[in-house]
Image: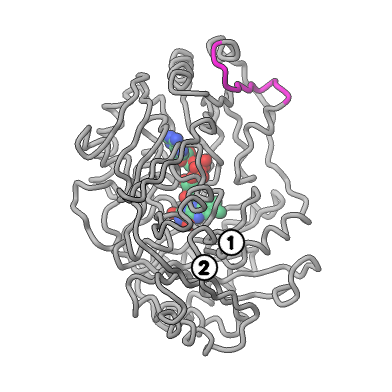
Amino acid sequence: MSVGGAIVRGILRFHPIVVWSSPVSSSTPPAITELQHTISGAVVLPDDSGYDDAREAWNLTVDQRPTAVVTPADVAEVRTVIAAAAASGLGVTVQPNGHGANGSLDGVVLVRPTAFDELVIDTDARTARVGAGVNWGRVLTALDGTGLVALAGSNPEVNAVGYSIAGGHSMFSRAYGLASRSVTAVELVDASGELRRVTADADSELFWALRGGGGLFGVITAIEFTLYPADQLFGGGIIFPIGLGIDVVTAGFELGASDPALGIDVGLARFPDMPQLPEPLRGQTVASVSFLHIGDAASAAPIVERLRAIGTPLLDGLREFTIGDLAAVAAEPTDPMPTIDWGGTVDGFDRVTATELVGAFLAGVQAGLSRVSVRVLGGNIAANPGIDDAAIGAITAPALISSGVLAFTPEMAAGADAALQPLRDFAAAHPTSGMVPSFLGSGTGLADAFDDASLARLRAVKERVDPNGVIRSNRPLP
Ligand SMILES: Cc1cc2nc3c(=O)[nH]c(=O)nc-3n(C[C@H](O)[C@H](O)[C@H](O)COP(=O)(O)OP(=O)(O)OC[C@H]3O[C@@H](n4cnc5c(N)ncnc54)[C@H](O)[C@@H]3O)c2cc1C
């Protein structure tokens, strides 16, 4: 939930966006060219006119050049694509949108799962079945009026499958846990072309791996997950000038500590001085708190009072809303963006660490840092449902940091490391363990999220279901 999202969209419309590019040097194997005749879904090759559009990732700093971009129409066509790639010595990766794009995709066939668009909500069973092409926005709209919520992110364009297999931290997670741990079934086509329905009872070890280990194990066609009750919702974001930053951050952590079910995100952001931005935020450096309370306005009143007592806000968007409105309340950026990110977990939050965090953010801003958000963890995120339950186990770290540099030019990208370093230093000074893989930053892999024992277990599953390493994930195993 980022209060600056809508504003960032405005900035993007007026900035010249550079899409990173390098020369093409590929010759397409015959089995891949042949796909243009053997499957009905689109197959776009590097020499085709639509290749640049087809290969584009949501993250515009990633210059990915796959051997082909294919949109299989059904399971049979997924099988054909995997067989053609394997016969040609190529990999296969699935990328619904590219929010987590993280590499060149050289020698890889890129699958767009758009055709897998089923969405079934069972209100009696409190479950959802979601195809691999479905983004969260559609799920949230379908849940409106049911009294049920999914453990969704607040960005409507993030894909429900990509998010759910990589941890998935929702504003509902302190109440109901990380999304991976609520996945009850995964249907996938594995590297041998077999369609499997994986559950706790059908290949429990693969089920464990799929709940947090990401896209390493097959082309997923659909997942099923549990829905949770939440009749009324109150929340949104409130933004203050950075002069109140330490008070804002401290208040956010106090509120998180006082209610383990409250979804809460503290943000610090720098907005450029551009006429397109709303006057109160133009050229401002700001601090914000976004929260999600399961309940009505009356029961949220103490939270609202605490936040409004901080001082005079620049913007106050706190209100009652429905699950279908979650994305509008969060106002996260949906258009593609050039962003270089870093994420980590940190220990111990009080006024002293809040002061250090604001200091680290302001040092980063001098070098081009755009934003940092700190999500309070704890609650059911820290509850261990059993060691064999999911690769993503109990995360006991108190807080999750995610930060980013908007890199509109190669020069800004070159400076990203320096801009992110003060936050890395801050996290290093407050070490803890555990990471939500969906928040891993640019250039990272699973080794940045899992301990050695979990990595060995993930590797054993991978070697069993995909011994030749055909299926590639954005977060590879070391
Ligand atoms: C603006 C923004 C907001 C975000 N908000 C949140 C948030 O609130 N909480 C959170 O936890 N994370 C959040 N994320 C992170 C996001 O959940 C991860 O980047 C996630 O991997 C994105 O999934 P995607 O499918 O949209 O992205 P993609 O880059 O298209 O896919 C990511 C990876 O998922 C795997 N994958 C996806 N679909 C399949 C499939 N059908 N079969 C096999 N593998 C598959 C692949 O390995 C792929 O590389 C956010 C990211 C962005 C950019």
Q: Decide: marks 2, 1 in contact (CB < 8 A)?
A: yes
Q: Residue at x 54, y 66 (%)?
A: 372
* Magenta segment main secondary structure: loop
**Left or right of residue 242: residue 443:** left
**Left or right of residue 292: residue 369:** right
Q: Position of residue 307 (x, y in %)?
A: 50, 83
Write down the residue under mark 2. Answer: 321
Between 239 and 223, the one lying in front of the other is 223
Q: Residue at x 45, y 37 (%)?
A: 131
Q: Position of residue 166 (x, y in %)?
A: 39, 47
Residue range highlighted in magenta: 38-49
- Secondary structure under the numbered disc 1 in the rendered image: helix
Number of numbered discs: 2
Write down the residue under mark 1. Answer: 328
Examine the rendering and report whether any part of residue 308 can be seen: yes
Amino acid at dot 2: Phe
Q: Is mark 1 within 8 Å of ligand 1?
A: no
Q: Badge 1: how crowded within 10 Å, few (<14), some, or many (20+)?
A: some
Q: Is mark 2 within 8 Å of ligand 1?
A: no
Q: Position of residue 52 (x, y in %)?
A: 69, 32
Q: Which mark is residue 417?
A: none
**Left or right of residue 453: residue 69:** right
Amino acid at dot 1: Ala
Q: Residue at x 51, y 32 (%)?
A: 113
Q: Is residue 259 above or below residue 210?
A: below
- Colour logic: one colour
